[in-house]
Amino acid sequence: MKGYFGKFLKIDLSNSRTEEIPISDADQKKFVGGSTLAAKIIYDYVKAGMDPLAPENPIVFATGPFTGSNVPMVSRAAICGISPGTGLWGEATTGGKFPIRLKGTGYDGILITGKAEKPVYVYVKEGVAEIYDASHLWGRDDIYGTQEKIKAEVDKKASVACIGTGGEKLIHYSNIMNDEGRAAGRCGMGALMGSKNLKALVVSGNQKTKIANPERLKGMISDARDTIKSNAYTQAYKLYGTNFYMDLAMRLGDAPAKYFTKSVFPAAKVHGPAFRNRYHMSNYACAGCPIGCGRIIKDFTDDIKQVDGPEYETVGAFGPLCMNFDIDSVVMANHLCNAHGIDTISAGVSIAFSMYLYEKEILTKEKAGMEIPWGDSETILKLVNMIINQEGIGKLLSKGVKQMAAELGVDPEEAAHVKGLEFPMHDPRAYQGAALAYAVGPRGACHLKGAFYSLDAPGNEVGLDLGITFTDKNDPAQKGALTAKILSFCELYNSFTLCQFSPIPASMIATILADITGADFKTMDLLTFGERSLNLKRAINNLLGITREDDHIPDIARKALPEGGTAGIEPDMDRMLKEFYAVSQWDWETGIPKKEKLVELGLESVANDLYT
């Protein structure tokens, strides 16, 4: 198999030992790379009732066969482990230059276990790993200062993936930051690093893998670039970043407001043009990306000369979800989260939940130690700081909405999460299939694992070769089968690895994979691979206690609203779940993939573990 080095680097921080782990051609072909290959490795560590923060539990940084090639939009890396926030399968992806430099070390990925006696950072360069003392970095600078100091110490051209205050304090939704403001943002991977006293992973190198069919790949790369250039969304991403979607999202009822209780709000106050009109903004592109959807705000304040972002999700979370339309405060909240390594989605949802509970007089001024009214920008920024510093009510908010509801005695149906992961800024009522994807997806409420807002929408050509076609988004009929396909297809992005915004169609993805690896991959093989990946991650969650009862959308994000694009619409969860389970061959009583399905997908050992 070309496109791989055929090995991972394993680092045990408890004893400062390193070793190379060979990855067979068979495993490369079956699990490909990224989050799926990481799941295969992590599976052997999974035990019922395990503590994600225990030293023996791993964190995996993984690339895929596309990483490091000249294919556009492939500078992505998956960071995986058992989530400290949910206790279940966790994965996040990041871009920038870090993924290419990670693969440039000469490894397909890095597996880290154990716990260092004191804070450390690991530097890997072209097959050599060194462990450095990070005591002088722990509890000091923000992530920007940390990156600058480490690069000055080891290599100015290296990429640094580090944690901030959030990871150091084991905040449930802390993230990992690299290349200044790029974020591996969900599932609390920052806390997993923090639990190991690992301040940063630093990577550099120029190692390259061999390509099986370089001449044909050149033609495919040219075709891919043409496809990206001609895509309708490319110019919108360039102009406004991901926040170009805000207006359309509000009209569709896809942008939640007032903690999922409204869908109509003054979108013009927080949409892409509002930011461009107010700030000096420029683009940021990950390595090899012709779009540049990232935003940079320059000269934000006298003290803050540059802010990364904010993206659509962040604007939605600190804006309409909190009924806040002061975009200066949205930018500042985003900057604080980036600087200290906090997931903006979970932080925003948790703050909005506190406002919702304050209005209902469940979280009183006496309990909170402060007033928490809707839309108050100063309160939002104060709560962000309290979350970061683990002060007062901020300590409870840092645990996420599921734990907030439990500790405050609130009805669980009012906590906006699935399996412990807070909903993103795509309302489950906007697309029937999206609600189902949230319910059954491998990491909980994840919009990237079931991207209905782009795949089940007019103009979609990415999944046509796989039968992923536009349907009536409000009709639950056949959404079980469609969701199964979309979930399987979305598994490819974090595995190959490929940016979720890439518009290249499935047939082109399969051909590129074949050209890189030399294996005979066909278009429909992509669905088989994705299905295998989805079932492997489901099995991990089953081992950790997940059943069908956990495939649930709470009332707060499911009950019909009286306004907007989803007025009167409630996802028909029972109907869609039954169809999905039947199509996917998951057992209705247990929520476990059927043994014959696992065997069919080549997961015999998993089948034996689940059915002994």
Image (cartoon, rainbow, N blue to C red):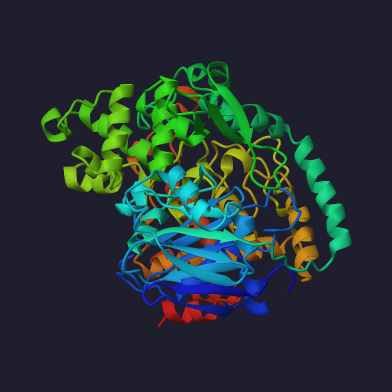
Q: Quadrant of the C terminus?
A: bottom left
Q: Is residue 95 above or below residue 62?
A: above
In front of the other: 591 or 353: 353
Q: In which quarter of the image is the N terminus?
A: bottom right
Q: In this view, does 334 lie above or below 26?
A: above
Can residue 53 be seen in the rendering of this structure? yes
Whole-percent x and y of residue 254? 50, 32
For the point 35% across and 54% down, the residue is 136
Image quarter of residue 203: bottom right
For the point 66% across and 40% down, the residue is 470
State left or right for residue 416 relative to residue 101.
Answer: left
State left or right for residue 597 relative to residue 343.
Answer: right
Can residue 585 be seen in the rendering of this structure? no
Whole-percent x and y of residue 71? 75, 53
Image quarter of residue 263: top left
Whole-percent x and y of residue 339? 41, 40
